[in-house]
Image: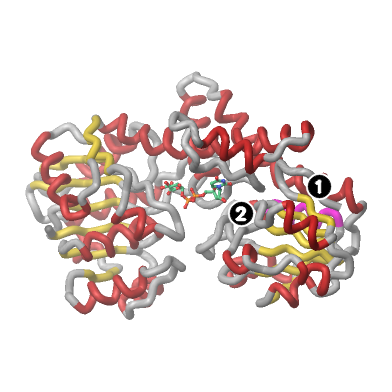
Amino acid sequence: MKITVAGTGYVGLVTGVALAEIGHNVTCFDIDTEKIAQLSEGNTPIYEPGLDEILRTNQRSKRLFFTSNPELSYKGPEIVIIAVGTPEKEDGSANLSYVQSVAEHIAKYITKNEIIIVTKSTVPVGTNRKVKKWIEEDLTQPCQIHIVSNPEFLREGSALHDTFNGDRIVIGCENEEVALKMEELYAPLNVPIVHTDIESAEMIKYASNAFLATKISFINEIANICEKVGANIEDVSKGIGMDERIGPKFLQAGLGYGGSCFPKDTKALVQLAGDLQHRFQLLESVINVNNKQPLLLLQKAKNQIGNLERKKVAVLGLAFKPNTDDIRESAALILIKSLLEQGADIHVYDPIALKSAKKVLGDLVSYYETIDETILHAEVTFIATEWEDVLNYPLRKYKEYMKYPNVIDGRNCYSLEMAKKEKITYISVGRKIIV
Ligand code: UGA
């Protein structure tokens, strides 16, 4: 099929590349000309394992094109997939201006008399119908507009894997023929399909992210109580996760969730409910627990080792999770912000995200490319992201390199047995403090 994907952010780019890989003819549109130039040369602007290779293979096979020309993008496709950003507005609601501008472009340039408009961007319930209205209002010639809500569930860092091995594909639309066409689009992926109405599909996306965020805040609260009663959160997570009704995933206690999705989508759902005179108290608490989680760890560290003013502090990991250079809403940044308020001298390490961090933190912190250099002579080390090289970093080295071996592990990277053997001060989440 001939498809245009609007937006080459995470979702758009991965979707475009994956659809080309399964044989479709895909044009990816973005207003960012620099990004398009970079992509046209076969380079991806995001760090995503495996994406570069598969992008280039499909470019060579002439199934994947990048352009900033809206006319070329929208005049001929059977399907347009909207995957532009829906950033958070000040009040927590989703900013739909990018979606609206895609709608304007489609209305202006479309030459066909029928088209399927698929929304993959995370949009508040009711937006798909607005998109249809926006396009219809601006059409310069008659065209039948079919809309489909088709939310995305891919994770950064494993986006390709998630696309090719998804748990489900959700298709929300009103027309049976269109639903079949969508099935045909995704058939080679061989992923189970859930058909719903448009509003339910829109809600599935928010409800999924809100539920996963709830699971994380829940386990973090249990971890906080474990610390008080002397229990071990790792064992508790294992024990509850073996109940099939609960499941083992997303029960990893730590500094809390970050990234471009959970923080934004949970706030947007609270806002959406509020606009409809429903106070979503459960989700409000999930957000509050998450905001507090990095600060609790910091407080625990201060209780143990005292004031951090002018002390050399190392922070390992800046990305909101491993395998991405994305630092948006990262727990590490919340931690660093409060360390700065305490007047600490901060030295940071991340294997991939230093460049993005520099844009935000500037010269407020010192940047290092190795863990050894970062922790050298430090009085405290905070572990904020469980990168593979942090997980594999020998605990004994903290003792060798640091001035005082105080390791504050926000991601429970080491076992308590290992920490005990090394005679360091080891403070983690939901587990006993080792001194
Ligand atoms: C999330 C969802 O997992 C995807 O299904 C969804 O498509 C995506 O948002 C989106 O809406 O676009 P992502 O933000 O890439 O994906 O990251 P996750 O892997 O879900 O992790 C989110 C955060 O939760 C990370 O900061 C991670 O460290 C934290 N987390 C995750 C925990 O603290 N504990 C866990 O057990 C799991």
**What span is colored magenta in the figure?**
333-342
Q: Position of residue 394 (x, y in %)?
A: 70, 68
Q: Residue at x 12, y 45 (%)?
A: 181
Q: Is mark 2 within 8 Å of ligand 1?
A: yes
Assess whether residue 336 is covered by the magenta stretch.
Answer: yes
Q: Badge 1 is on which residue?
A: 433
Q: Secondary structure at mark 2?
A: loop
Q: Residue at x 23, y 71 (%)?
A: 65
Q: Where is 5 relative to 242, above or below? A: below
Count of picture labels: 2
Q: Where is 204 relative to 59, above or below? A: above
Q: Is residue 194 visible?
A: yes
Q: Position of residue 104 (x, y in %)?
A: 27, 50
Q: Residue at x 62, y 36 (%)?
A: 236
Q: Residues within 10 Å of mark 1 (few under 14, many from 20)?
A: some
Assess whether residue 428 is covered by the magenta stretch.
Answer: no
Q: Badge 2 is on which residue?
A: 330
Amino acid type of the residue tagged 2 in the rendering: Ser
Q: Residue at x 62, y 58 (%)?
A: 385
Left or right placement of residue 383 versus residue 201 in this view: right
